[in-house]
Each structure stands twice: as C-alpha cells, then as structure tokens.
Image (cartoon, rainbow, N blue to C red):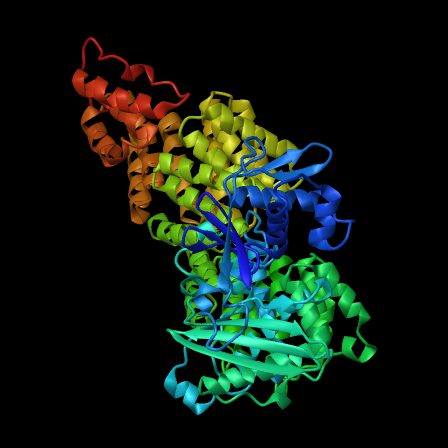
Amino acid sequence: MSRRSYHFGEYRVDPTLREVWLADRLLALPPHVFDCLTYLIERHDRAVGRDELVAAVWGKTEVSDTLLGQTVLRIRREFGDNAKDQRILRTIPRFGYRWVAPLDIRESSDASSARVAPPQPAANRNAEMQVETVAVVTPAPINRKRWLAKVAFGALAVAVGAGAIWLLRLHVGVAPRSASALVDRPPISAVMPATVVEGTEWAWMRLGVMDIVAGRLRSSGLPSVPSENVVALLNAPAANRVGTVGEALGARLLVTPHVQHLQDSSWQVDLEAEDAGQHYATQAHAHDATEAARAATDKLLVALGHEPADAARESTLDATLMKRIDAAVLADDASAARALIAQASAQQQASPELRLRLAKLDFRAGQLDAARQRLIALLDEAPEKTEPVLRASVLNGLGAVAIRADNASQAEQTFGAAIKLLEAQAEPAQLGQAYLGRAAAAEEQRHFEAAAADYARARIALRQANDTLALIRVAADEGFLDLDIGRPAQALPQFVAATEGFKQWGALNEAILTYIGQIGCRLDLLENREAMEAADAADTLAQRIDNPATLASLILARARALGAVGRLREARAALDDLRSASDDPITVAAAGVVLARLELDSNHAAAAGDLADRAVSALNAPSYARLRAEAWLTQVRVAIRTADAARAAKLISALDDWAGKTDEPRAALFARLARAEYALQFGDGNSWRSAFDGARDFAARNAVPYEIAAVTASYADALLGYHDFDTAQVEVGRISRWSDQDFVCAALEARLYAALGRNEARQTAVARARALAGERGIPADALAVPISTGTAAQ
C-alpha cells in the first residue's frame, strides 16, 4: 500500500498514521483539531464550507460556531498563523475556510499498515494519542480556598473499582502487591489515551480504556502515573513540555492501547508497551470492551513478570457504564456524567461508587450542601473497622467541603480522622491528599509548624503515588507558607519551579496563582522590576482564562507591582476598575488597601483614610492579617498628617492590642513603626529615636528588605529633618544595597548626599532614582546641594 503525507515548511502531516511532525518532534493535537486540519489539507484546491467541515469532522451539523472557531484557532496557533496574516488558513467570509499554505505532497510505501509484533516503540507513538480540551485543574481564588479544597478533594480523583481516576479508590479495587513486585522495584508506567477504530459513539473508550489499563496495572502492584496527569500533560501545549512525554511524567514504561470493534460485534484490545528499549505487544478479545482491556492488561502483566490482581476484588457494577461515566468526568463533561448516572438502574445508583461520583460532581459545581449531604449519608454506611478506606474517602470529601465553607477548624479535624484510617492502608494517593487537606486547614488558621509538617508528609506519600502534578502543588503550597511566615527568599524558588511546572502541564489558573506568589516575593525583596516582569507574564496567561477570582487576584498583585515601578496611573485605574466591578467585599477591601497608600502618597489624606477605615473593618479574618496591618498603618499616618493626635493615639492603641493577638510579624512591626511616627510628631524630646530603634531592630529579625526599608525610610527622613547626618548615614547605609532597584532607597540616598554636600555622589544617586521613578517626582531636597551644610545631632 502507499501512504500520502503533506509537507509545508518544517511540518509534516501524515493522515494515515494521524501524526503531525515539526522537524523531528511529534506534535500533540486533539482528534477534532487533527481531523479538521487534514480535511482542509486534503481539499486544499478549493474552499470548504462551514457546514461541510462540521459534518465531516463532528458527524453532525448542530455544532456551534464557537466550537468550530476554537478548533480553527488551535490550528492557527499550532502552525504560527493568525487571523490577520492567514498564511496557513484563509477565512472565506460567510462561507468557510481554505488551506492556502504551499504543500509538498509525497507518496511512500506503507509497510507498517499491518499490525505486527514487535510494535512501534511507544515513545515514538505516545504523542499521537491526544486528548480533547480537558480542564483538570480547579481555578484558585485570592485566598486559595478553592485550590486548597480541590487538592484535598483530589482524593476523589483516585480509582474506584477498576481504576477511575476522579474518585477515591475503594477497597474493592486494590489488591496487595506481589512479593516479586516489591523486591524487583518495578518501573513506573504511564498509559496513554487509547486509539479507537470506530465512530463517535465509542469516543469515551479513548479515556475509559486508558484508565482501565492504568488501574489494572496499579492494582496488580505495577506503579502507574495517575490518568489525570497523563490527560493534563497531553492537553497542554507541546511547546511547554520539557523532554519526552515519559520524562515529563516520570515514567519508564509507556503503554498505548488500541481498541477495535470487530465484525462479529466483539472487541479487540491491543496493548503496545516499551520499557527502556524492550518492546511488548499483547492482544485480547471479548464481547465487552472493558473485559478485553482487562484481559490484554493481564497478559501484559504476565509478560512483565507480574501476577495480575484477583479480579474478584473489583467492582461488580456495570463496567462499561462506570467507565463511560469516568471518561466523561476525565474529559471535564460533567453534564454527560450526570446524564449517564441518571440512566443507571436503581441498584447502581444506590452503590457507593455512583454516590461518591455524584458527591464529586456536586462539589465541582459549587453545590456544597448537596455534596455534604451525600457524603454524610455515605459516612453512616462506612464503619471504621470494616470499611476504613471508604470511610477515609468520605472524610476527605467532607474536609474539602469544610475548607470551601470557611470552616478550617472542622476541616483539620476531619482530615485528621481520615489520616488515622489511612496510615495503616496501602493508599499513598489518598493519604497524600489527606495530608494536603490538613496542611491547608492548618495554614488557614496560621498553624504554620503543623502545616509545614503535613506538607512534608504529603510529599513523601505523593511520591509513592507517582503523582507529579500533586507534587507541583505541594511546592506551590510550601511557597505560600513561606511567604505567609515572612520568608520571601525561601518562597521564591518554590514559586518559580511550581510556575514552570504548572505551565508545562497546562494548569493556567495555578500558574497565574504562583506568578502572584512570585510578585509578592519580589516586592518583599525590593526586586520591583522582576515583580513587574512576573506580573506581565501572568497577564499574558490571563488572556486564556475566564475565572473571575483568579483575574481579580492578579489585578491586585499587578497593581502593587505597577505602583512599585512608578506606573501610578495604570495602578490607580486597575484598582478603581476592580473595586467598581467586584461584588466581593474582601476583593474591594484588598484593592482599597493598595489604593489608600497611593492616595496618601499623593497627599489625598481624606480619601486614603476612608479607604483604610473600610479595609480594617472588612479584613478581620486571620488570613488577611498582613493586608489589615498595612491598612491600619495608613489610618495612623492619615491621622498624624492631619494633626489629629487623639485619633492617632486611639488607632495606635487598637493596633497594638490587635497585633498582640495575631502572629503576623508585619502587624507587630507596623504597630512599632506607627508608635515611632506618632512620637516624632506629637512626643516630647528624643523618645522618637528609641521608638525607631526598636522598630528597626524588630524588622532586622526577619530581614525582609521591604520591611527594613519601610522603617528606615521613615527614620532617616526624620534624621535628615533634624540634621543628624551622622546617624542618618548609618541608617541610609542599611538600605543603600537596594538603591539600584528601589526608588525610595535611591531617592533617600540622593537626599543624604545632598545634605552632606557630596554633589558628585548626589548626581549619581539622582540618576539612579530617575531611572526608577516612573511617574514619581524626585524629592526637592535631593535636586541640589544646599549653600551651607553641617551636622547637628538633636
């Protein structure tokens, strides 16, 4: 037989093998995108109407214009085209599309059309098993509650019965590992989506058969990468991937299923596997595709030297129905999953498997009460002694619901109960998720040591479960923990690594969230330009998501970065828009904290005070302590600037009292700084000096550059005002290390040189300050050396 391939530029499209190559790299395209691409290429000599294209690719005519437009957009992006240039695809207005790129059409003999053993290496085929658009990551809000809850409820993303990846694995689907498996340390396997030689009615088998094979390997003692990880990686842009699919997944054994419906109505499943150059091929037939998949997997296990698990331990429910439901969830089609559950028999709907699936669907839809009720009912049917794994599964779900419902204390207790049950079970994935959930609940309550310990435990468990994506989440969570504790230098590498990991896996919401973490770290380290770069990178990703909470969080972080580099009008506009568009009082208050600082710097004291007052009232939860401390300091400064000594004293007393009850270091620091500034304005004698010394020494404990600079800027300003240049030199010298990157530090250094009469040094410092100023003005006393200078200690 001959095979035709199409070449244009560095690309090669092979319709027979369903492969697209860029030079020597195999690209990953979802099936409908590939079908649309090849249909247009094969008809390059004419324009193809929209209705014709839809009927050919989807087999129906009611597909929306949006779906077709998204498919064409994906083709343009993959091949570097766009709607403006149209070098690859030309849009024919009110008709359809035409392929316009020059093609080199080549014919070759197809010696590989017959399936023979040994099979083609899986490493060369795995990228052709593509996944349609899948969203496997729950978006994260400003305080990360949805992300943390999703991670905790991710335990509902482990196998039930034969290995569905989105529910907690019940005891009926797990067999003990064989002795040989424990001794030989088997390679980690990854199962690719199956190729299905059939029509669209069998499309569910692509993910369903994949998950059957992965679950069967796992239950027989052969470690297997969670199916959700495979789906996420293949759905992400191939350009983001580092190394091969196997390297990205951390898997040595790659398995590719092929499913075919035969003329006698039976099913044939072939498995091709490669392990470090060793090839395996197995085949099985059965009247049910799921049974054929299990049988083929058992043959593969035997070929690999493993004993298949006892099939009697697996679920007795309708395997085909269950796998269709699981495949729908894996493909992020919740409505299809619910419809299939509704079609199940009354007996099936009463089973723990389906009820857990419904609880998961309710949770994902934000129906927390419905999810809680289903889980509580299941809890009553799962005794601790006879059903420990099922009970732990339900407890993990209830813990996740508690996090989403802002009940961190209850969540911590519930996850703790699940952990006690799981510690004696061979369930590392569930145990890892329970540790993550308890850590999240502890962090929410600012129990930082407990949270750090549980994140460490989660990492150990999830490594055993081969869950790379969950491990990236652990790194991100530890970054946020370090940032909460006040250790931005330690948090930053965690965020950078997590951001790159999330981008590789196509988890855009989480990548944006960790970019926000990077922005916070960079600002704390006074690396303002780098913070702006991170904000711009996150903003680019934000064009591809539509989650309001994530976008609001990014706008707030980006506004801080804009202010730090002096782009004040942009920052103010972003904050004003956010406050007017959001109906979330916490978001409005958080934006008000940043805007209040900008208003005070612009000498709009009344506006600043009003914004700060509202923020202090709204941000009273422990997780908002840092924002609240900043707003409180702004309140005090407004009172001092307006010479309202009584109000300033009252505010400082309240700030002192609150700071003593919270463990937020910045609250205690700002309380000291507020008292020093009050003493400077309204106190007697030199008490302000000792107050500033105390605040400076307190800031030095954590050694966070932003905090050190915040105290020193205020202290040095006072020293310059009193002409105490000797002491001012010491204080300005503490922050001069950051004068190349922070405007406030650079401007203060220029003021000191001017006061000392060091004109050459002043000019250099002013030049640094101008480069960092943006829309901010250089202080007047830095622009020229006074006619006479001197030192006078007060």
Q: Position of residue 349 (x, y in %)?
A: 78, 75
Can residue 289 be seen at all in this image of the molecule?
Answer: yes
Quadrant hosting residue 711: top left
Residue visible at 18% across and 16% down?
Answer: 759
- The quadrant of the rendering that contains the C terminus is top left
| Residue 580 relative to residue 51: left or right | left
Query: Is 88 located above or below residue 60 in the figure?
Result: above
Residue visible at 72% across and 42% down?
Answer: 50
Q: Position of residue 510 (x, y in %)?
A: 51, 52
Query: Is 47 located above or below residue 463 in the figure?
Result: above
Residue visible at 74% across and 59% down?
Answer: 335
Q: Nearer the viewer, residue 171 or 787?
A: 171
Q: Nearer the viewer, residue 536 or 523?
A: 536
Residue visible at 63% across and 78% down?
Answer: 268
Can residue 546 be seen at all in this image of the molecule?
Answer: no
| Residue 198 relative to residue 34: left or right | right
